[in-house]
Amino acid sequence: MCSQIIEKADLSASDVIILNEKIFGANPSQNQKLRSYSKSDIFKILDYQKKHHLNNSQLAKHFRISRNSITKWKRMFLV
């Protein structure tokens, strides 16, 4: 699994997060404030929400993102 991600030409933020969880465990609370997302990552997250019929709270819990960030992204990119 990790080798497939590492061999990609372009790593997305979600790829880096997956690798980080595999290497250091599933406790991302220490680095939560340092995350940043590109537009393509944001669109993938919002598409995931639409595809799986999730509300903002459910999406935030799934990706460990603030509900406020999701709301901000929707206002910036979808309105």
Image (spheres, rainbow, N blue to C red):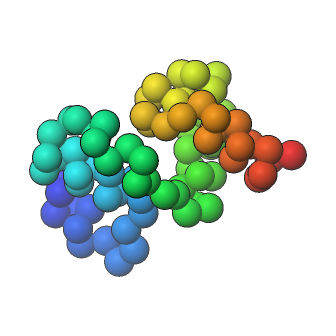
Q: Is residue 66 left or right of residue 27?
A: right
Q: Which percent across, then down, holds residue 63? A: 44, 36
Q: Residue at x 22, y 44 (%)?
A: 21
Q: How many marks?
A: 0
In percent of width and height, residue 29 lies at 31, 37
Relative to 60, say whether 9 is above or below: below
Which residue occupies the foreground of this view, 57 or 6? 57
* In-front residue for pair 76/14: 76
Is the residue 50 above or below the residue 12 in the image? Answer: above
Is residue 38 visible to the viewer in this orientation of the structure?
Answer: yes
Q: Farthest residue in the bottom direction?
A: 9
| Position of residue 55 measured from the top left corner of the image (x, y, whole percent) | 64, 22
Q: Residue at x 46, y 26 (%)?
A: 61
Give the vertical position of 23 relative to 70 (above or below).
Answer: below
Residue 52 in view (yes/no): no
The image quadrant of residue 75 is top right
Quadrant of res 38: bottom right
Q: Residue 45: x, y in percent?
A: 56, 44
Query: Camera-side residue: 2 or 28?
Result: 28
Residue positioned 44% across, 29% down in the render = 62
